Image: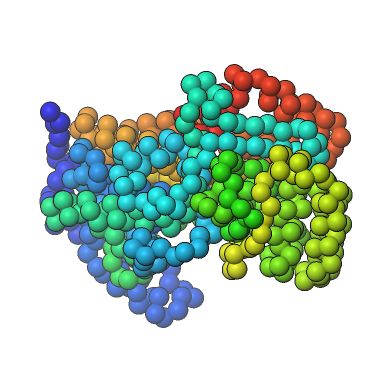
Amino acid sequence: MARFFNPPNYYPLAPYLSSPPASDIFTSTNHMPSVLRLVRGLATNAKPKLQDIVIVGGGPAGLSLLSALKNNAATKHLQCTLIEGSSFDGVRKFAQDPPETYTNRVVSLTPKSVEFMSTKSGSWDHIQTDRVKFYDHMIAYDSQDPDARIEFDTSQVSGGGGVIAAMAEVVNIQGSLLEKIDELNEELAPEYQANIVEKARVVDIKEGKGDLDWPVVALDNGETYQTRLLVGADGQNSPVRKYAGIESRGWPYNRFGVVGTLKVQYEDYRAIAWQRFLTTGPLAILPLTEDNVTFVWSSTPELADTLMKVDEEIFPHLINAALVLEEVDLNYIYKMLRANPSDKQAIEEIQWRLSKIPDEELEEKYPVPVARLMSGSRARFPLKLLHADTYTAPRVALVGDAAHTVHPLAGQGLNMGQSDVAALVETIETGISRGQDIGSKLTLDYYTAKAWPANHVLMGICDKLHKIFSTDFSPLVFVRGFGLKSINMLGSIKDMMISSVSGR
């Protein structure tokens, strides 16, 4: 039988309700607009609402943490608030009535993440499964050596069966989590229900005054919250991380990721994820349902600018070229389109070059040709590597992009965030079972020890892969080509690699 410990310094919150509000939360109002000064003044005078956990950020990591806490018998009694600066109206609308076309923010979910959503956060029952595509085959190949490729097929690894990952839209994941939280709130007593504050931004975070040193979070709507544990799920520019004084180290790649949604000429029933390593950065074609695919093209700033400007009629041909043609041909086409992004002559140049390749080779070694770009689906974002020195400070924990930002070539960003959440929930649960203060370093250090090293190793691998494949230096091209061919023939090594990629 589960046993709950309620020492005075942990639970309930009642002894703290008479504590005076923190004063002088905002000290620097020079140069602020008068309206913002008024809002901050109101927040300063407001009595903070006391909470066990405040989560800043309503992305998949933040919502997953809130759902997992409320879905756990040991933690569901915690008073939790999630703060999100934007509105969830679009997410809720998607959950009730999704559009026919795919959105362009699509991520890869490993089987481990799917299991977490099924058993811990409990949100998988609410996801739009008809918009989720599982794949069991992955092919990566080198633009500098057409024979240097590696294929992963789960039917051929030890044990057989299973999947590598599933492709799902971010908004689909968020929608399923919101619906699960709503469902859990209906089952919980009012005082234990999850509190979601949307369309409210954090304007300041200060340490509490007097006997209660808990962080005080002030919002632009005038509300303030004082919390035993403050969780930053607020992205790579995390205000929570800055408040905690945690350094985040890394570097920009001087590359952009261009994403979008495509229609291919016909549905590929093989369910393959493709990735071609170009010297400008990898191009991934990832399967969605029916004849839909999503792409992630990592490229130089100059090429990314061209990719965003290219005429929509030309763009599918450019994708097909980038998946097949040699880089000398690609550079010629890029030059044409930099001069004129609407130059239809580029289509003829691409088709002529592709016609030189036998149809049998195109069908066997490359993805199904792209037919159309979904209008308005293109977007780009800068690529960088950042890793926090630690994931915790007194009364603070970081999850997701607030803790780490990784190159997208392995599709592990969201999965790392899910692993963070799983480790943090386990840490909080353990702290409760031992009668510890969930915001103390003694409790939280276990989370960093469990999550940080594994993320660090994975980020290092992604960084090295990016550097190894982003060069046309002949000796290195030969070595990496030899390595790909060799690994492709070693079943045990491929087993280990696919297990790592799929999170098993």
Query: Of residues 61 and 41, which is closer to you in this image?
Result: 61
Whether residue 185 is visible, yes or no, is yes
The residue at the point 48 percent across, 28 percent down is 161
Toward which corner of the image does residue 141 lie, by quadrant?
Answer: top right
Q: In the displayed structure, does residue 442 sit left or right of residue 86?
A: left
Q: In the displayed structure, does residue 440 sit left or right of residue 387?
A: left
Q: What color scheme is it?
A: rainbow
* Rendering coords of residue 48 (x, y %): 24, 61
Whether residue 248 is visible, yes or no, is no
The residue at the point 43 percent across, 45 percent down is 399
* Rendering coords of residue 446 (x, y %): 37, 31
The residue at the point 42 percent across, 52 percent down is 130
Q: In the displayed structure, does residue 234 sit left or right of residue 486?
A: left
* Rendering coords of residue 162 (x, y %): 47, 31
Q: Residue furthest bottom?
A: 34
In the image, residue 252 sits, relative to residue 89, either above or below, namely: above
Q: Quadrant of the N terminus?
A: top left
Query: Of residues 211 and 107, which is closer to you in this image?
Result: 107
Query: Of residues 291 and 51, which is closer to you in this image?
Result: 291
In the image, residue 279 sits, relative to residue 29, either above or below, namely: above
In the image, residue 461 sits, relative to residue 183, either above or below, namely: above
Q: Residue furthest front?
A: 360
* Rendering coords of residue 12 (x, y %): 14, 46
Q: In the displayed structure, does residue 482 sit left or right of residue 226?
A: right
- Figure disc tally: 0
The residue at the point 53 percent across, 28 percent down is 155
In the image, residue 257 sits, relative to residue 435, either above or below, namely: below
